[in-house]
Image (spheres, grey):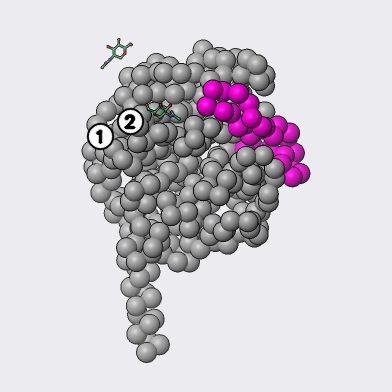
Amino acid sequence: MALLLFIMFMCGAISSHIASRSHADFRVSGRALYKLDISWPRNPELFTGQVFAVAVNHLRGRVYVAQRGENIPKVLVFSTDGELLQAWNTSSLEMPHGMFLANASADPTLWITDVGNGPFGHTVKQYSPTGKLLRVLGSPGKAGSSLSPLQFDQPAEIFIHSSGEIYIVDGDVNNRLIKLSPDLQVLWMHAERGSGLAQFYIPHSVAVDRYQRVWVADRGNKRIQVFNSVTGDWLGSWGSCFKDDAPCSIRFTPDQKYIVVAQLNTNQITLLEAPPIGIIGQCQVISTIELAEDVKPHLVDLDLKSSDLYVAEIGAGQAQKFVPLSAAGV
Ligand SMILES: *[C@@H]1O[C@H](CO)[C@@H](O)[C@H](O)[C@H]1NC(C)=O
Ligand SMILES: *[C@@H]1O[C@H](CO)[C@@H](O)[C@H](O)[C@H]1NC(C)=O
């Protein structure tokens, strides 16, 4: 019996270790929740820059990939089957950093933070799904910390709640978490650099869960901080899971059972247990996907219908798709 279990374990370990193309290596430790889909995208050579962000429209089956580089399309649009559908032809994006697909059901738009130093940089921009610039938050080309007019300094990421409320983590200079109303009034903000409660050092990614909690990857402090989305009150902090490497991105699986975190330097995707309402407690790692060396996963997004996980990989210069293992109950 023990031998049989051992053989089954070895087979599991081998089958989850795939090495069919460069950077496609991965290993899972803890509970196996996801496996790599090596068939997505169909033509990985279409990636021509450094891939920084991904965003998924689960209702239309679209995956947006933001990349940086000279004279390349800054956003590539794929189908969830891996077909390239469009390359945006916009000159209004300099250095895309974070991306969010808002309002999937009614009127989908893409929100992209731009950390460029040129005439369009230091802004958060809203685009149509085909790349038409609709709205610019911030003062293009002018880094700053003003609230009126609104300014940003290398804004890292954005999360738009279904209510239309906007959460922005504003970079390594301002170290701010800002909540805006749909008509762009500042509702609350934390804007102090430091390592104390509700202070930040390089806030890098933000997500809101179904229990009115705002989760922030506080990268420079190697921790996640949690806030009440209505009041902005600090609720808790997780650090013990990130001693080796900081959390870089934060998203929830559609069932909100797991928090998905990318760790860039250790090349890991970590799935943590999402705590129930009323409790933050200590972090608990359920599963770790260890990517090949130098893949450098940066930001992630999930398909809210299929639970598929997309990862933007700066080092590997590509986005990859991971699919839930059927019995995992993700
Ligand atoms: C891309 O945009 C530029 C400038 O707006 C325009 O000159 C060019 O024709 C466009 N290319 C395509 C393929 O649409
Ligand atoms: C979502 O789309 C509807 C319909 O177009 C629109 O009225 C609403 O303002 C949109 N919400 C956001 C947050 O963009």
User: Which residue is denoted by mark 1 in the rendering?
Assistant: 84
User: Which residue is denoted by mark 2 in the rendering?
Assistant: 76
User: What residue is drawn where x is 74% and y is 45%?
Assistant: 197
Camera-side residue: 254 or 223?
254
User: What residue is drawn where x is 42% and y is 51%?
Assistant: 254
Q: Tell me if 58 is positioned left or right of 184 in this view.
A: left
Q: Quadrant of ligand 2?
A: top left
Q: Tell me if 177 is positioned left or right of 199 in this view.
A: left
Q: Is residue 182 magenta?
A: yes
Q: Which residues are magenta?
A: 175-203
**Residue type highlighted by circle 2:** Leu
User: What residue is drawn where x is 35% and y is 80%?
Assistant: 7
**Residue type highlighted by circle 1:** Leu
User: What residue is drawn where x is 36% and y is 29%?
Assistant: 107
Q: Is residue 190 magenta?
A: yes
Q: Position of residue 283 (x, y in %)?
A: 61, 59
Q: Are marks 1 and 2 in contact (CB under 8 Å)?
A: yes
Q: Residues within 10 Å of mark 2 (few under 14, many from 20)?
A: many
Q: Is residue 116 above or below residue 46?
A: above
**Callout 2: helix, strand or loop?**
strand
